[in-house]
Amino acid sequence: MIAGGTGITPMLQIIKAILRDRSDRSTISLIYANQSEEDILLREELESIAKQYPDQFRLHYTLDRPPKGWTYSSGFVTKEMIEANILGPSENGSTQVFMCGPPPMIKFACIPALKDLGFTEDHWFSF
């Protein structure tokens, strides 16, 4: 999953639905992009979910304007960021990337990076 700003809303609903089903062992990785640390919506809830489900949910942030000491990524979503934080494409289609955020982020950062990593259009969906 890749979310930008308020694009976190549908992602959180999907995350909760997957984790609510105890028989679903899907793993979820989320890259959440924002302008600044203060802009991170639902941060406490996301971090709580990451602690509660460490084997199923991974959370990574990137900020355009990170504060000093920021331990996550900075800048736009990149190929390297996706490669480090999201599973690669699968031949059987089991890896799906859901994206929701500003259209320029999806069009100019996420999709080109996914293509560079070998993902095809049947591997992603943007809201």
Image (tube, rainbow, N blue to C red):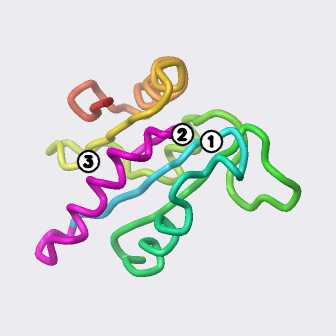
Q: Is residue 36 above or below residue 26?
A: above
Residue 105, position in %: x, y?
A: 53, 25
Q: Earlier in the sequence, mark 2 or mark 1?
A: 2
Of tags 1 and 3, which is closer to the observer? 1
Res 50 → quadrant:
bottom left
Q: Callout 2: 10 Å neighbours few (<14), some, many (20+)?
A: some
Name the side, left or right, on which 64 lies relative to 20. right
Query: Residue at label 3?
Result: 95
Foreground of the two, 64 or 26 = 64
Residue 14, position in %: x, y?
A: 26, 53
Residue 91, position in %: x, y?
A: 19, 42
Q: Residue at x 46, y 41 (%)?
A: 3
**Cβ atoms under marks 3 and 2 closer than 8 Å:** no
- Quadrant where the C terminus sits is top left
The type of residue carrying mark 1 is Asn
Q: What is the secondary structure assignment of the residue under circle 3?
A: loop
User: What span is colored magenta in the figure?
Assistant: 1-25
Residue at the extreme right of the image, as rendered: 68
Q: Is residue 40 above or below residue 69?
A: above
Res 77 → quadrant:
top right
Q: Is residue 21 above or below residue 66?
A: below
Q: Residue at x 50, y 54 (%)?
A: 85
Query: Residue at label 2?
Result: 5
**Cβ atoms under marks 2 and 1 closer than 8 Å:** yes
Residue at the extreme bottom of the image, as rendered: 52
* Mark sitting on residue 34: 1
Q: Any magenta on residue 23?
A: yes
* Mark sitting on residue 127: none
Q: Any magenta on residue 13?
A: yes
Foreground of the two, 127 or 73 = 127
